[in-house]
Image (cartoon, rainbow, N blue to C red):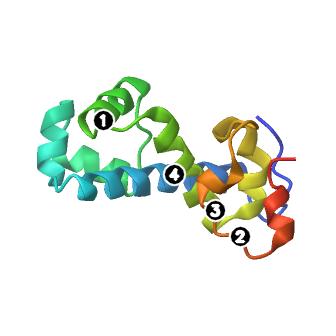
């Protein structure tokens, strides 16, 4: 794992940032599909309480459950993780910059991401 350049953010803080961003995206997609937590949980074989833990960023979601979730919500892993990246970017740009190569291909068009840029300097996030 890369060292965090932001000295005010521990690895635990970074992990929590990722968990919260993933949970926020799960919640957003579920709401778009007009599903209750109980409905989505049932589709992927977990309890509603466990889904709530994922959405609140309390627990890690396994890869197999994430794949089931993406299938149920009819979204691609690429789209999911681009939105997770945007959630991270909105909370902590330094962490987003540090991990951008994991989430975003250098070949992607920056305009497709619809990042909330404050100024022109932020547009150089990929390089």
Q: In what element is the residue under mark 2? A: loop
Q: Earlier in the sequence, mark 3 or mark 1?
A: 1
Asked if marks 2 and 3 touch (Cβ < 8 Å), the reply is yes
- Is residue 16 or residue 43 the one in the foreground? 43
In the image, taking residue 18 as reference, residue 118 lies left or right, namely right
Which marked residue is nearer to the observer: mark 1 or mark 4? 4
Label 3, label 4: how far apart the Cα atoms are:
10 Å
Q: Position of residue 23 (x, y in %)?
A: 41, 52
Q: In what element is the residue under mark 1? A: helix
What residue is drawn where x is 27% and y is 40%? 73
Q: Earlier in the sequence, mark 2 or mark 1?
A: 1
The quarter in which the N terminus is drawn is top right
Which marked residue is nearer to the observer: mark 3 or mark 1? 3
Label 2, label 3: how far apart the Cα atoms are:
6 Å
Q: In what element is the residue under mark 3? A: loop
Asked if marks 2 and 4 touch (Cβ < 8 Å), the reply is no
**How many numbered discs?**
4
In the image, taking residue 71 as reference, residue 47 lies left or right, namely left
Label 2, label 4: how far apart the Cα atoms are:
15 Å
Query: Residue under circle 1?
Result: 69
Q: Residues within 10 Å of mark 2 (few under 14, many from 20)?
A: few
Query: Residue under circle 3?
Result: 115
Label 2, label 1: how far apart the Cα atoms are:
30 Å
Which marked residue is nearer to the observer: mark 3 or mark 4? 3
Which marked residue is nearer to the observer: mark 2 or mark 1? 2
- Is residue 121 or residue 65 the one in the foreground? 121
Q: Position of residue 2 (x, y in %)?
A: 81, 39
Query: Residue under circle 2?
Result: 117
Query: Residue under circle 4?
Result: 83
């Amino acid at each position: 794992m890369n060292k965090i350049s932001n000295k005010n953010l521990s690895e635990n803080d970074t992990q929590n940032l990722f968990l919260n961003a993933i949970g926020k995206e799960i919640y957003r997609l579920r709401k778009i599909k007009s599903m209750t937590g109980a409905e989505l949980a049932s589709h992927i074989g977990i309890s509603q309480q466990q889904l709530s833990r994922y959405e609140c960023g309390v627990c890690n979601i396994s890869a197999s459950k994430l794949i089931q979730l993406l299938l149920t919500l009819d979204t691609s892993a690429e789209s999911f993780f681009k939105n997770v990246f945007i959630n991270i970017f909105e909370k902590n740009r330094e962490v987003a910059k540090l991990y951008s190569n994991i989430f975003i291909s250098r070949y992607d068009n920056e305009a497709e991401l619809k990042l909330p840029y404050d100024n022109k300097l932020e547009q150089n996030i990929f390089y």
